[in-house]
Image (cartoon, rainbow, N blue to C red):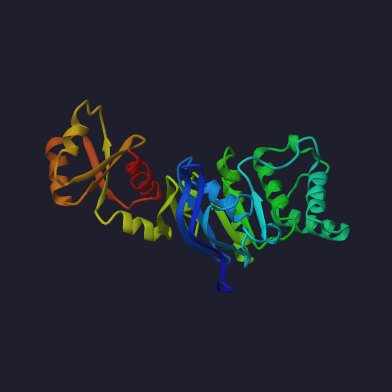
Amino acid sequence: MSEQTAVKVEKLVVAFGDFKAVNEVSFEVAQGEIFGFLGANGAGKTTTIRVLCGLLPPTAGAVTVAGADPSIDAMSVKSRVGYMSQRFTLYRDMTIGENLNFTGKLRKLGYEAIRSRIKELIDFIELEWPLSTMVADLPAGVLQQVALVSATMHDPQIVFLDEPTAGVTPHARSRFWELIGKMSEAGKTVFVTTHYMDEAEQCGRVALMRSGELIALGSPAELKESTFPEPLFELSPSTDAGAGWQAALRSQKFCKELETFGMHYHVLADAPAAFESYVARELPEFSHKRINPSLEDVFIRLVEGRER
């Protein structure tokens, strides 16, 4: 494995009886990269992360994390990675300081190392709450930042974040991603799962999983280009369009896909002129415009579309 490769996965399989939660997944993550992992619930994202962190043995395949094989030397891997799970891993009946001291001791850090590391990380997240504050009294966004500090107390090379911003405000999500960016700039590899497409846009590369398989991998721009070679249009009704128009539009030869997006509709049309002529003739109550695809469009087409 190259010194610049933080994670290497080759034909990973994780099976529970006859069920394959992860089926021959392969990818690499570069040192310092922000790597996004997307997929619907049950796609195999968390299972893959648990293998990479040395928490779950693989059924087959080869995995190397920070230069070590978690199936052979799990303790070495655990010392080099930080893991923040979907649920906050802080004790709510303890203070911030007590939580961080406890985490440092679990990581077998000395007294001075713990004190120095707490100060460094508290400065890093610019925490304004006293360390004597009970965790139960913290807002969700601050709680999430303190959980990040706890997960990185031992200064890991790779940080795994499993849906770290679920259930917090947009402002708190934005602040958390500022911290992710700062970690990446400092050379740490950040491996993050998320259901928020605006967050995935901030990743260097994104992997999409479906039913235990890796179905797409690339930068956000590459995924959009490869997934939507045909023109994409947005239809917006000005009045109630009534019934039947969607089936009629889908029956047209030029219409490859029609998806609902809030109060609008996205149409994939391989013959733009024919589509625009049809709208003008058959759908006068609609306005339309050509748009660039988003990662949400990519996700819906590759993941939700195939499942339907």
286 and 308: which is toward the camera: 308
Quarter of the image where the N terminus is located: bottom right
In the displayed orientation, state which residue is furthest to the front: 17
- Residue 86 sits above or below residue 78 on the image: above
- The image shows a total of numbered marks equal to 0
The location of residue 192, given as percent across then percent down, is 55, 52
Place of residue 9 in the rendered image (x, y in percent of width and height, measured from the top left)? 51, 61
Residue 294 visible to an observer of this rendering: yes
In screen coordinates, is 4 left or right of 223? right
Residue at image position (45%, 55%) is 24
- Image coords of residue 29 (percent x, y): 52, 63
Given residues 217 and 165, the one toward you in this image is 217
Q: Is residue 130 visible?
A: no
- In screen coordinates, is 146 left or right of 285? right
Q: Is residue 221 left or right of residue 169?
A: left
Q: Residue furthest right?
A: 111
Q: Position of residue 131 (x, y in %)?
A: 81, 45
**Res 98 quadrant in image:** top right
Where 2 falls versus 103 (above or below)? below
Q: Nearer the viewer, residue 2 or 32?
A: 2
Which quarter of the rendered picture does the C terminus lie within?
A: top left
